[in-house]
Image (spheres, rainbow, N blue to C red):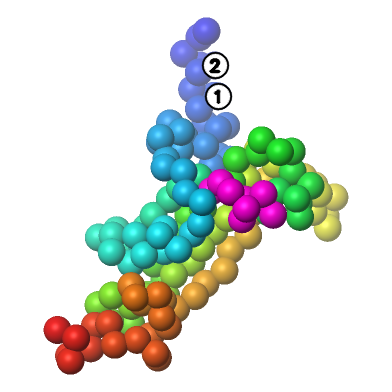
Amino acid sequence: MSLVRILAMGIGLTAYGWSAAASTLPVVSNVRGLLISAIDSPSGKADAWLSGPMADKLRAETKAPAGTKVRASVSTVSEFRPGCKRLRLSLAMPTHRMLTVNGTREPFQMAYELNLCRDGQPPQASSVGLKEDQ
C-alpha cells in the first residue's frame, strides 16, 4: 500500500473521529466514572468507548447496527471551584451515518452539558471545594 494512500486513509478516519488513539480507549458501561475522571484530570477531559445498556439504548433509538461503537467524550466547559465543573458530554457513533434534515448523511453525535462536583452532586448542593471541606 502506498504512503499516499495510507495518509489519505488516516486523514479520512481522523475526520470522522477515529484515530490510532481511539482504538486504545478504555471501555465503560456508564458515563458517571468518565465525568468524575474529567473533573479530576489536569486536561479536564476523559474519553472511552461506551458499552452496556446505555449504548444499546442509543443504538436502538438511532437504528444503528448492533456492533456500532459508541464513543463518550467529556470536556470541561468551566470550573466553578476546585472539584466542581461544568462538563460537556458528547456521545458519538463515528461509523453510523444518519440522514439530516438537509438530506445529507452525517455521523451521529449528540451532546449536553451539566454542572457536577466530584461527589456526584451539583455545585449548589455540594460542599466540595468549599473552605469547610479543605
Seen from the viewer's position, the closer of residues 105 and 122 is: 122
Residue 79 visible in rendering: no
The residue carrying mark 1 is 9
Q: Secondary structure at mark 1?
A: helix
Say left or right for 97 vs 125. Answer: right
Say left or right for 133 vs 2. Answer: left
Amino acid at dot 1: Met
49, above or below 24, in the image: below
115, above or below 131, in the image: above
Amino acid at dot 2: Arg
Say left or right for 91 vs 32. Answer: right
Say left or right for 103 vs 127. Answer: right
Q: Secondary structure at mark 2?
A: helix
Q: Residue furthest left?
A: 134
Please rate how many residues cluster around mark 2, counting C-alpha atoms within 10 Å: few if below 14, some from 14 to 19, many from 20.
few
Indicate yes or no whether the magenta region holds residue 55.
yes
20, above or below 29, in the image: above
Q: Which disc is residue 5 wearing?
A: 2
Secondary structure mostly taken by the magenta-highlighted segment of the chain: helix
Which residue is located at x 49 percent, y 59 percent? 31
**Residue 1 image position (x, y, % from top left):** 52, 7
Query: Do the numbered discs 1 and 2 sit on residues whose CB atoms are within 8 Å?
Result: yes
What residue span does the magenta drawing correspond to?
50-57
Q: Which disc is residue 84 wearing?
A: none
Please rate how many residues cluster around mark 1, counting C-alpha atoms within 10 Å: few if below 14, some from 14 to 19, many from 20.
few
- Report the quarter where the C terminus lies: bottom left
Q: Residue furthest top?
A: 1
**Residue 105 image position (x, y, % from top left):** 77, 45
